Amino acid sequence: MSDAPTPPTPPRPVVELRDVSKAYPRPDHVAVEHLDLDVAAGEILCLLGPSGCGKTTLLRLIAGFEIPDTGTVRIADQIVAGPDAWVQPDRRRIGFVFQDYALFPHLTVLQNVAFGLRRGSRAARLERAKAVMDLVGLTIFAGRYPHQLSGGQQQRVALARALAPAPAVLLLDEPFSNLDAALRGSTRDEVRQILKRTNTTAVLVTHDQEEAMTFGDRLAVMRAGHLEQAGSAETVYARPRTAFVASFLGRTNLLRGEGHGTVARTPIGDLALARPAQGQVMLSVRPESLHFRPNGNGVSVRVLQREFKGHDLTFTCQLTGSDALRLIVQTGPDCTVRVGDTVGISVTTAAIPLEPSVSSAASLGQTRPTSR
Amino acid sequence: MLIPALVAGIGTVVPIVYLVLRAFDADAATVARLVLRERTLLLLLNTVALTVGVLVTTTIMAVPLAWLAVRSDLRFRRLVTWLAVIPLAIPGYVVAYALIGLGGHNGLMAQLFDLTVPRPRGYWGAMIALSMYTFPYLFLNVRAALMGLDPSLEESARSLGLGGREIVRRVVLPQLRPALLAGWLVIALYVLGDFGVVALMRFEAFSYAIYLQYSAAFDRVYAAWLSLMLLAMTLGIVIAEARLLGARRYARIGSGAQRAVVVTRLGRWAPLAHGYVWLVLLASLGLPIIVLTYWMALVPPDLAAWRAVGVAFLRTASVAVPTALLATAVAIPVAYMSARVRMRGGRVIERLAYLGYAIPPVSLALAMVFFALRSAPWLYQTVPLLIAAYVIGFLALAIGPIRSAVLQVPARIEEAATSLGRRRFTAFWQVVFPVVRRPVIAATALVLMVTMKELPITFLLGPTGFTTLAVSVFSRTSEGMMAAAAPFAAAIVVFSSLFVGLLISYEGRR
């Protein structure tokens, strides 16, 4: 910003949500409660959460398809929803890619892509539409109708249509969930490349943790209308803030312990902590941080179950002592431990102390427990 | 969007209000003396007997026909289906005309078989005529239900040890229940609302009595009371149907694709089935055509007669076309609101439109007369008032197809258009309307066809001398001028059949 005073402030986020709430009179709609969120220019943010956590509602609040009860929404330095501001969706400079694509069935691919282009001469609009179609590799389908295309092609038309007017932010609502597994991975990579090439700011909603981790520059984990944690995939995976985040993003072992500074006393022995904690604390230990000790060192466990997954092995074990605690251990594919064996176990990386969820106290009853 | 919807809603309420106002014009004692007399009870019994008779007859006609057309290996099943729907195009008064034209000295039977049968009159005449033109409504409903029946349900019943007859009783019939109820409801509404048939057959059911009271006896308070009673009966039937249907689920539960319908081999029963099918079709479709052809051959219409038909046709079209366009224009916002907008009012207005459809036409016409006389004398016996009454009466016909079409368009489509810079209204016209264009045209055609053959509203409400095709058929037939009525009736049948054929093929191509 040219009128920015000294010292230079960082550029404003493209999307800014402050204290946004949305409640529905009917219980089958998911609410969003006092939520703050920023999306920086050119960033791809993935909103991740179980079904019914309010992530789609949040996306629709940004788009303007829903009106927030409280808080403000700002897009590209303009307040689009607030106590005394409201901008209709058609004036927000957003692009929206729907789960079912919502292509206009009566228009050709070219007409669909050109639908949002309203400024400039006819020739200029046509040129822009063709350029975007070229970008997503659709040029040869220009004259076809949506129903004549495959799912993956429809998906790209939807993307091209949303990108054509060069929106300030692109919103994607589970755009890959209608594609079959084989196509999903490659389409995802393609779309990501296109977004990066055009330096598009994007928010993508998904319930697939793998998709969120590979697609987003940053991910935001939601639960029961609250934002549990936001950050890069690596940070959120390695340093989950709450038990929910730890178990939603991959598998984990949740252990009760008693913190004494940088060490905590737990049923599987004294563990080093990633950050200091005092008193009763819940700890997350990833399965790949646990290792079998063939010579019987460490705490001894009995193996209950063994799952071979090709590139790795997952074991379910139970402590042999009075505590019937169960643990998940992940090893390489050539581990020789079998069901029924009694082996020692040890922890190699620091355990992560967890905070209680914001949402857990208020709304545990609403969310289904995440069983994974 | 809101304004046409509100106009539509108010439009339905106004006539009922005026009916009530007129009914309470007289003091309580007079009202009691008028209403609580034997004649009222007689009318009530007549109407109930007529309704029950028609329901029984149409069930006997339609259910086996539907079963044969869907679940048997009967030959020409497509043709049979098509022919069984065509009677929708033949108005009741033309069927009545055909029955009357059979008997008498110059009648078809007398000329061809030298057999002078009395012209059918009264209960039996009315009951048969009504059954023959209303049975397609039941046929269509039962046919759709039979096609939707999941054969695996019958197979699992069989695997649980039920015999053929038991399966029909415990599995098939319960599943046909909603279709039967829906069909019976429509037919009962037609019977209650019918004017042409009961008037031509001189059978004292409510609507004929209302007309007599109004035109001959000029007793408008009693006419208003009879109209209200008829309206109450109609609403009672609608509510009863909703209650009987209840909140049960009949749709397929669970996943998996449904398999094709299993066809029963008729074998040695085939001749009997054919005999039955062609008898029904001969009675419902063949009879009017044969009788009309007979009278036109007996006294071939001259040029002047054909010119009169042309004039009446154009006159009919001059009210039917604006009615169809106006009804569609009002139906689009109402249908859109009830399908899309999360608002109580939307549903209420839609219900009111259906109320307008359920009001017996004679009651509606009378209510509009009262309204005009009391509040807008300059509208009395004018074409605009006639068109307004048509629109109130037929709006629901246009809403139905448009609403279900809008419901099939995902709301995402409009949101996509909005996210691409269109306002809501523009979004509707640019992306929803093109998709629902065909049903909109079908709705317009339906209203046009129904208005073209409408009788009681035109008869009571039209300007003096405003003889449409329907009025021409009716007045000539009621005076026994069978030959003079024939070309007008033929014009209606030809025109309506073309439209029904058009609508069926339109539906088929969707």
Image (cartoon, coloured by chain):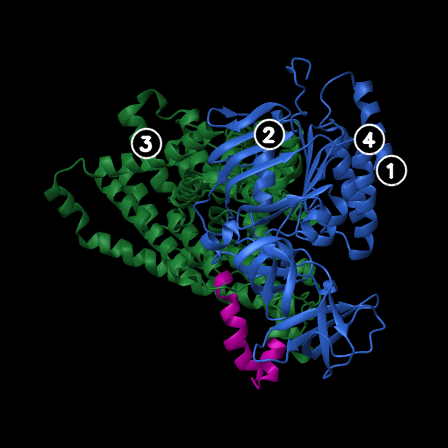
Chain colours: A blue, B green
Residue type at mark 3 is Val
The chain identifier of the residue carrying mark 3 reads: B
User: Is A313 one of the magenta-colored residues?
Assistant: no
Q: Nearer the viewer, mark 4 or mark 3?
A: 4
In this view, A91 is above or below B477: above
Query: Are dots 4 and 3 on a single chain?
Result: no
Residue type at mark 2 is Pro
Most foreground residue, A38 or B293: A38
Which residue position is annotated with label 4? A132
Residue B409: image location, x then y, percent: 62, 43
The part of the image, by quadrant, that contains residue B462 is top left
Farthest top residue?
Answer: A3
Q: Earlier in the sequence, mark 2 or mark 1?
A: 2
Q: Is residue B218 left or right of residue B417?
A: left
In this view, B242 is above or below B213: below
Which residue position is annotated with label 2? A89
Residue B447 is tagged as: none
Q: Residue at x 61, y 46 (%)?
A: A229
Query: Are dots 4 and 1 on a single chain?
Result: yes
Which residue position is annotated with label 1? A137
Q: Please report the bounds of the magenta region as a residue range.
A: B154-179
